[in-house]
Image (spheres, rainbow, N blue to C red):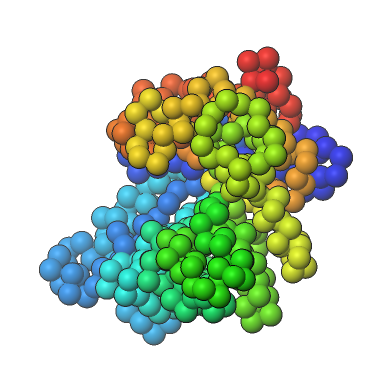
Amino acid sequence: MVLPPGRTLPMHFGYQGDFFSPQVRTRGIEAIQQSGFQWAKQQVVWSQYEQSSTECAKEPGNCFNVVVNGRTHSYRTNQFSYLDAVMAELSKANLNILLSVVHAPDFLAAPGGHSPADPDQLRDFVTVVVNRYKGKVRAVEPWNEQNLAGEWGASRMWPNAPAAPPQGVVDFLALMKSAYVGVKSADQSVIVVLPALTPTGVGECWLNPDVRASGGCIDQVKIAIDDRLYLDLLYQVNGGEISRYFDVLGVHPSGYNNPPDDTPEKKTVSSTGFKGHPSFYIRRFQQLREVQQKYGDNKPMWFTEVGWSVAAKPVSGYEYATENSEAQRAKYIARLLELVYNEAPYVTNVIIWNLNFRQIVPETDEKYGFGLLEANGSPTLSFQCAADFVKSGGKVSQPVCR
């Protein structure tokens, strides 16, 4: 692809999928190759791999031990064998692999949360994973959406509210430092992604001094922390120490029921809801870039999850998906890629959410609507338009995609 004016770094493209089922994996790999994309993202649920020594003793045939940094860890043989197959086949297909690590085992998790009580436990786990898949894994995103209670733990988000910085942000910095050291100790060449925050305006009320002084925001910040606010607070801790512990900034822009060029001030569709706040629009990523630059950080940005849902039977909270048609989504995705490629030279990887969950989950699951392959594995129009952009050298060539 010929780089457009202003872009000095190439842009890469990928899909997040689930590649554990052999049949689904084969079709998924084939689809990525056909699309011209180069990256595949697979989530690794830590709690499925590591077990306590007590659990290990109950099933010794399905357990192996590894000593890392002087600590003995017990892992499930069968679970790692599944991941072995995924990594082998994705690598054989010459795909670059991004692993997203989430959810500590209960016996290691901090009370009231999913992250580990001791951040060095994550360091050990990512060390084991990167060592095991050295030469295959290209990047690691060592957590996910830590500004959400569901990913971090409600009681651990901002227990010291309204004081700043939030203890949850301080704890996340410690986790990120440990994860970075763990990845780099195993393989210096592996890219460490600062885990993406979920776009939300919840908790933004803290920015209002009167609300903050009255304690009126405390209930909100137990649910989530506005992503722009969270990132800003993270850079403030210890004089911006976080900037030394990641290589690229992960973001999760979401379009909801809005085209990629819409903003709170610009509405071009008749859809209702999810309007008015910047977190409801794709261009939220530009505000996160402003936070980076505010603190002198010019590291590249990766979209480690981006997409639109189209669903006839959406789960609660995703009703907006009924307002998106497949024809609209195809145009949205094509325009997204065009926009980022031409207007955001600091974005160097776009991972679309998702590839193949329609083959894995029922239609009533929230992940179903985001899928770009149908339940039978056939490509949606959105998939075809994304492929068209890459194969056309960074242009939207098909009229149906414009």
Above or below, 49 relative to 88: below
What residue is shown at x 47% (from left), y 79% (from top)? 160
Above or below, 361 relative to 158: above
What residue is shown at x 69% (from left), y 80% (from top)? 239
What residue is shown at x 49% (from left), y 66% (from top)? 217
Asked if residue 22 shows in the view, the reply is no
Image check: 189 left or right of 324? right
Image check: 223 left or right of 279? left
What residue is shown at x 78% (from left), y 41% (from top)? 343
Which quadrant holds the N terminus? top right
Q: Residue furthest right?
A: 5
Image check: 100 left or right of 241? left
Q: In which quadrant of the rendered view does residue 368 lie?
A: top left
Q: Residue furthest top?
A: 399
Q: Residue furthest bottom?
A: 70
Where residue 280 appears, as percent x and y from the top left, is 57, 43
Where residue 2 appears, as percent x and y from the top left, is 80, 35
Where residue 216 appears, as percent x and y from the top left, is 49, 68
Asked if residue 81 shows in the view, the reply is yes
Where residue 147 appears, as percent x and y from the top left, is 49, 62
The number of discs equals 0
Viewer-closest of 348 and 203: 203
Viewer-closest of 22 and 164: 164
Which quadrant holds the C terminus? top right
Above or below, 277 relative to 328: below
